[in-house]
């Protein structure tokens, strides 16, 4: 057994007790604060009031699910691991490429490195889209709630996930999809007792319900119960979020959308600019593929600076960066982003063309993420720090460092 493991330039101490890192999708800190305030999250209440470590951290940009989950499990920003959204545009081939496949991942994970060093490792995700990336080269257990009925020992390191969890297979659009992840975590700790576990939920509830609503509080109450069980079972728990979540609609409940492809086509003529929305994935019912971040690829870059200023002047747009600026400021891989990166203001989302967004599935006023306004996330542990933590810009991808090196 080793005393430490070094991955991607960072060194992590061997765990003294099981470490469970939980990524709660879309968990803006206000959700926890409201649930604590309502008295439905007693465990989180204790952590918030001094029994543990409670920090605020910045997630990576764009504030989307995959880039952040991959940063958390690699300990580095997208410039190093390469996953900067669900899609990038391959300019040479002229096609949009999905980044769900591990071949797009440029570094190894902390999870795989600890497994190689002899640790028992388990990963449970809500949606299957993350499973292959998180489980890349991992010798251990790795399965999704979404496809828990299809696990095999060969592929997932476990052969009866439904039996383990003792819940029916949840719908991909449900709170139960995340509950399944927590129950699986508790059951694994009770049975296999992994040394290292990574649990990643889905933000279906956060897309639909604002902090403090009955729906949101019920979700955080459920989560609180399971976290308390993990704590009772002796684990160190570190909890963070992949990104925050904000309302993106007007007082009438209509989404505030800048249809950027329509604007660019009107200004430049069709076919001169291509808008890519890295939030787009196969599961868009709850957000209509609308987030607060977009990339623009230009056929002719000579007018790039003028266009940047013109887009920046649009109502609802917060910042427009060139490729080099975006790579530098947001730590993004230059070869997988557009000529321009567009960030919307907190209450606004960016679409391509109006006709390409099906908003019929939005049965609640739009809440979404992707921008700088969703960068602040909680980073907390169920144990106090060993020594006073130095002031620094905490990142959600410091989660493993916090759990393994910094708390008692
Ligand atoms: Zn997410």
Image (cartoon, grey):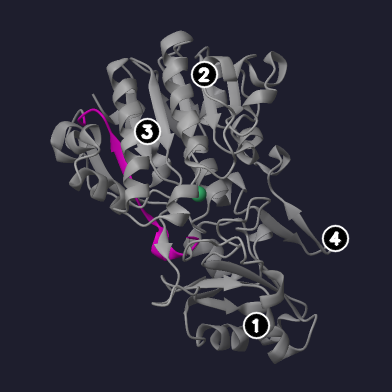
Q: Are marks 2 and 1 in contact (CB under 8 Å)?
A: no
Residue pictured at 66% horizontal, 73% vertical: 352
Instruction: Give residue 93's mark.
Output: 4
Residue linked to disc 3: 401
Residue linked to disc 2: 166
Residue 42, above or below 98: above
Residue 197 picture location, percent across and down: 46, 24
Q: Disc 4 and disc 3: Cα gap in Å?
A: 39 Å
Q: Residues within 10 Å of mark 1 (few under 14, many from 20)?
A: some
In the image, 8 versus 84, the foreground residue is 84
Which of discs 1 and 4 lies nearer the camera? The answer is: 4
Dot 1 beta carbon under 8 Å from ligand 1: no
Q: Which residues are magenta?
A: 369-385
Residue linked to disc 1: 304
First along the sequence among labels 2 and 1:
2
Q: Disc 3 and disc 2: Cα gap in Å?
A: 33 Å
Residue 89 picture location, percent across and down: 74, 61
Residue 350 among magenta residues? no
Secondary structure under badge 4? loop
């Amino acid at each position: 057994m080793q005393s430490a493991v070094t991955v991607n330039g960072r060194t992590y101490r061997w765990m003294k007790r099981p470490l469970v890192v939980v990524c709660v999708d879309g968990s803006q800190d206000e959700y926890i604060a409201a649930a604590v305030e309502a008295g439905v999250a007693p465990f989180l209440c204790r952590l918030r009031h001094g029994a543990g470590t409670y920090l605020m951290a910045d997630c990576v940009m764009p504030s989307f699910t995959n880039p952040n989950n991959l940063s958390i499990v690699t300990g580095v920003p997208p410039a190093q691991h390469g996953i900067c959204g669900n899609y990038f545009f391959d300019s040479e081939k002229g096609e949009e490429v999905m980044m769900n496949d591990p071949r797009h991942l440029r570094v190894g994970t902390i999870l795989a490195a600890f497994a190689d060093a002899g640790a028992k490792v388990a990963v449970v995700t809500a949606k299957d889209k993350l499973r292959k990336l998180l489980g890349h080269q991992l010798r251990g257990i790795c399965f999704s709630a979404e496809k828990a009925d299809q696990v095999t020992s060969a592929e997932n390191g476990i052969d009866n996930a439904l039996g383990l969890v003792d819940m029916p297979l949840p719908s991909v659009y449900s709170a139960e999809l995340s509950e399944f992840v927590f129950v699986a975590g508790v059951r694994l700790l009770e049975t296999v007792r992994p040394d290292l576990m990574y649990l990643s939920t889905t933000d279906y509830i956060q897309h639909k319900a604002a902090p403090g609503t009955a729906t949101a509080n019920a979700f955080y109450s459920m989560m609180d119960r399971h976290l308390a069980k993990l704590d009772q079972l002796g684990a160190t728990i570190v909890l963070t979020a992949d990104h925050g979540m904000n309302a993106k609609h007007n007082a009438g409940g209509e989404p505030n959308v800048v249809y950027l492809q329509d604007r660019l086509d009107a200004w430049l003529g069709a076919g001169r600019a291509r808008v890519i929305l890295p939030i787009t994935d196969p599961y868009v019912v709850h957000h209509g593929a609308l987030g607060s971040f977009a990339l623009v690829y230009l056929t002719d870059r000579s007018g790039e600076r003028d266009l940047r200023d013109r887009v920046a002047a649009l109502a609802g747009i917060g910042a427009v960066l060139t490729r080099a600026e975006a790579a530098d400021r947001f730590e993004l891989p230059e070869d997988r982003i557009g000529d321009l990166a567009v960030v919307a203001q907190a209450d606004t989302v960016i679409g391509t063309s109006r006709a390409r967004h099906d908003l019929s599935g939005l049965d609640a006023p739009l809440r979404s993420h992707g921008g700088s306004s969703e960068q602040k996330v909680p980073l907390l542990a169920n144990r106090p720090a060993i020594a006073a933590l130095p002031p620094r810009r905490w990142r959600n991808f410091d989660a493993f460092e916090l759990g393994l090196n910094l708390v008692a």
